[in-house]
Image (cartoon, helix red, strand yellow):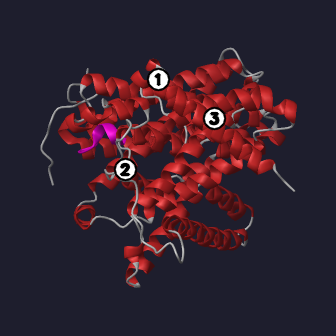
C-alpha cells in the first residue's frame, strides 16, 4: 500500500496548522498580515530541503500538486454564478479587460527586454562565457513560475546551458520570495497610506483578521446547502462538479495537443506550452459547464460560497506547496547573474509596477495591482493569496477580470513563446543576430504596452509622477 501522498498531505497540513497557530499568537505576523499559507510554505521549504531527504521524502510531489491545484482553484472560481448586475457591468464595458491585458503585457515586455539586456551587459563585461538564454529565466521564473522555468530551461541544457534547470528554479524561488515578502509589505504600506478603502480598512484591523481566528462565539456564514444530505452531501456535489470539469479540461487540451502534433516539431513545442497554461483551458471549460447548468435550469444547485471554500482550500495548499517545492541548492555556480537579474526583477515589479498600475486602472486600483504583482513575481496562486488578504471572499471582480485578461494575454504571448529559444540558438549557431532579434521582439511588446498605457490612462499617465502610488479620485470617462 502506497502511503506516500498521504504522508505528504499530512506534512503540508501540519505546516498549515503550525502557520495558523503562529499567526494567532505572534504579534509581528499579525501586524504585517502574513498569511498562514506563506508561513507554512517557509516551514515546508526548510523541511523538504534539510529534513525530508533524510527520510526519503523529496519535494517532487509538491510540483505536481501545485500544477493541479492551480487549475482546480480557477475552476471553482469560474463555476460561481455571476451576480446579474455585475454581469451587465462587464458586458457594458471592455475597459477593464484592456487595462489588465496592458498591465500584463507591460510586465512581459519589461522582464524579457531588461533580462536580455542585463545578460548582454554581463557577457560584454565580466562573464563572456555566460549562456545568453539566461536572460529569459527572469520572465520564466518571475512571470511564469517554476514549472515553465524548469521545462524550458531543461531544453537549453543540451545546447550548453549547464545547470539551466537549477537557474530556472532559483529564479522562480527568488520570485516567490519577492512576491510573498514584497506583497505583504505592499499591503501594509497600502493600509498605512490609505490605498485601501475605509470599509476594507476597518475589516483588516479587526481582531479576527489579525489573528486569523474569529473570537469565541462569533461565526461567519461560510456556505449554504443545495442538496439533501440523504442523497449526496452538498460539498461532495460541488467538489465532484469541479473535478468533472477538470477532467473535461484535460480531455479538451489532450485533443488540441494531438492536433498540433500533426504540424510537426513546432506544433509539439506549442502544445507543451499550452499545458503550462492549462488554467486558461480550465477556465474555458468551467465557463461552458456553468452555461450548460444554467441552460438546463439547475444552476441554483451551485452555491457560490461553497465554491469559495474549495477555491480557498486549493489556494492555501498551492501557496504552501509552491514554497516547499523550491530547491535551495539551485543557485550554485550562477550567483552573480542570478543576483543581477533578480535585482532587475525586483526593481520592475516593486517600483515600476505599482506606479503604472495605480494610474492605469480606473477602479479597485490597489487590489488589481496586488493581483498583477503576485503573478509577476510568483505564480497565479501568489496573486490570489495576496488578493485574498484584502478581499477574502473575492467579492470584487478583480480575480475574475484577471482570468479573462490572462486568456487574452496568452494569445498575445505566442510570439514570445516561439522566440524563446532564439538566444540559445545564437549560442549554438554562433549568431549574435538571433539574440538581438529576441531583444527586438521583446522591445516590441514593451512599446506596445506603453502605447496602450498612454491610450487607457490618458491624463493620468504621468499625474503626480513623483508619487509611488496614485490615489487621486477621478471621474470615469466612457
Magenta region, residue range: 361-368
Nearest the camera: 236 or 262?
236
Query: From the viewer's perspective, is 306 left or right of 39?
Result: left
Residue 380 visible in the snapshot? yes
- Which quadrant of the figure contains the N terminus? bottom right
**Residue 15, which numbered label?**
3
Q: Residue 235: x, y in percent?
A: 51, 64
- Which quadrant of the figure contains the C terminus? bottom left
Identify the element where label 2 is drawn.
loop
Q: Residue at x 34, y 42 (%)?
A: 218
Spatial distance from mark 3 to mark 2, Cα to Cα? 25 Å
Q: Residues within 10 Å of mark 3 (few under 14, many from 20)?
A: many
Spatial distance from mark 2 to mark 1, Cα to Cα? 23 Å
Q: Residue 46: x, y in percent?
A: 70, 26
Q: Residue at x 26, y 30 (%)?
A: 195
**Residue 29, which numbered label?**
1
Asked which quadrant contains residue 458, the reply is top left
Q: Residues within 10 Å of mark 1 (few under 14, many from 20)?
A: some
Q: Is residue 24 above or below residue 268?
A: above
Residue receiving disc 2 = 394
Amino acid at each position: 500500500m502506497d502511503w506516500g501522498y498521504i504522508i505528504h498531505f499530512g506534512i503540508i497540513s501540519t505546516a498549515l496548522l503550525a502557520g495558523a497557530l503562529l499567526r494567532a499568537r505572534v504579534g509581528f505576523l499579525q501586524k504585517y498580515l502574513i498569511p498562514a499559507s506563506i508561513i507554512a510554505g517557509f516551514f515546508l521549504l526548510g523541511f523538504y530541503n534539510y529534513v525530508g531527504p533524510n527520510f526519503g521524502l523529496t519535494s517532487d510531489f509538491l510540483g505536481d500538486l501545485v500544477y493541479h491545484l492551480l487549475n482546480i482553484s480557477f475552476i471553482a472560481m469560474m463555476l460561481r454564478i455571476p451576480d446579474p448586475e455585475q454581469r451587465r457591468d462587464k458586458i457594458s464595458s471592455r475597459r477593464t479587460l484592456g487595462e489588465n491585458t496592458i498591465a500584463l503585457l507591460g510586465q512581459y515586455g519589461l522582464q524579457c527586454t531588461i533580462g536580455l539586456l542585463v545578460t548582454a551587459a554581463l557577457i560584454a563585461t565580466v562573464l563572456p562565457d555566460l549562456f545568453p538564454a539566461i536572460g529569459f529565466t527572469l520572465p520564466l521564473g518571475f512571470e511564469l513560475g517554476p514549472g515553465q522555468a524548469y521545462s524550458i530551461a531543461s531544453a537549453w541544457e543540451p545546447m550548453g546551458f549547464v545547470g539551466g534547470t537549477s537557474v530556472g528554479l532559483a529564479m522562480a524561488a527568488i520570485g516567490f520570495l519577492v512576491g510573498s515578502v514584497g506583497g505583504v509589505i505592499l499591503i501594509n504600506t497600502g493600509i498605512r497610506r490609505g490605498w485601501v478603502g475605509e470599509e476594507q480598512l476597518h475589516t483588516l484591523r479587526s481582531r479576527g483578521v489579525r489573528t486569523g481566528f474569529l473570537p469565541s462565539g462569533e461565526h461567519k456564514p461560510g456556505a449554504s446547502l443545495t442538496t439533501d444530505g440523504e442523497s449526496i452531501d452538498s460539498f461532495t456535489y460541488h467538489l465532484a462538479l469541479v473535478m468533472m470539469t477538470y477532467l473535461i479540461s484535460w480531455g479538451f487540451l489532450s485533443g488540441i495537443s494531438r492536433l498540433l502534433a500533426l504540424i510537426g516539431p513546432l506544433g509539439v513545442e506549442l502544445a507543451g506550452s499550452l499545458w503550462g497554461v492549462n488554467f486558461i483551458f480550465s477556465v474555458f471549460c468551467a465557463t461552458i459547464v456553468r452555461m450548460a447548468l444554467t441552460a438546463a435550469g439547475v444552476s441554483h444547485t451551485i452555491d457560490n460560497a461553497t465554491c469559495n471554500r474549495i477555491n480557498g482550500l486549493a489556494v492555501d495548499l498551492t501557496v504552501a506547496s509552491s514554497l516547499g517545492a523550491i530547491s535551495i541548492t539551485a543557485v550554485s555556480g550562477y550567483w552573480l547573474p542570478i543576483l543581477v537579474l533578480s535585482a532587475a526583477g525586483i526593481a520592475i515589479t516593486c517600483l515600476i509596477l505599482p506606479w503604472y498600475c495605480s494610474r492605469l486602472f480606473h477602479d479597485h486600483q490597489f487590489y488589481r495591482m496586488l493581483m498583477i504583482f503576485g503573478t509577476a513575481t510568483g505564480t497565479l496562486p501568489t496573486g490570489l493569496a495576496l488578493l485574498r488578504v484584502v478581499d477574502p471572499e473575492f467579492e470584487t471582480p478583480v480575480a475574475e477580470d484577471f482570468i479573462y485578461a490572462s486568456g487574452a494575454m496568452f494569445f498575445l504571448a505566442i510570439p514570445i513563446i516561439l522566440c524563446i529559444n532564439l538566444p540559445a540558438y545564437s549560442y549554438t549557431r554562433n549568431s549574435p543576430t538571433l539574440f538581438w532579434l529576441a531583444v527586438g521582439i521583446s522591445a516590441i511588446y514593451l512599446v506596445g504596452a506603453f502605447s496602450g498605457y498612454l491610450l487607457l490612462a490618458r491624463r493620468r499617465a504621468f499625474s503626480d509622477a513623483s508619487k509611488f502610488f496614485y490615489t487621486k479620485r477621478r471621474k470615469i470617462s466612457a
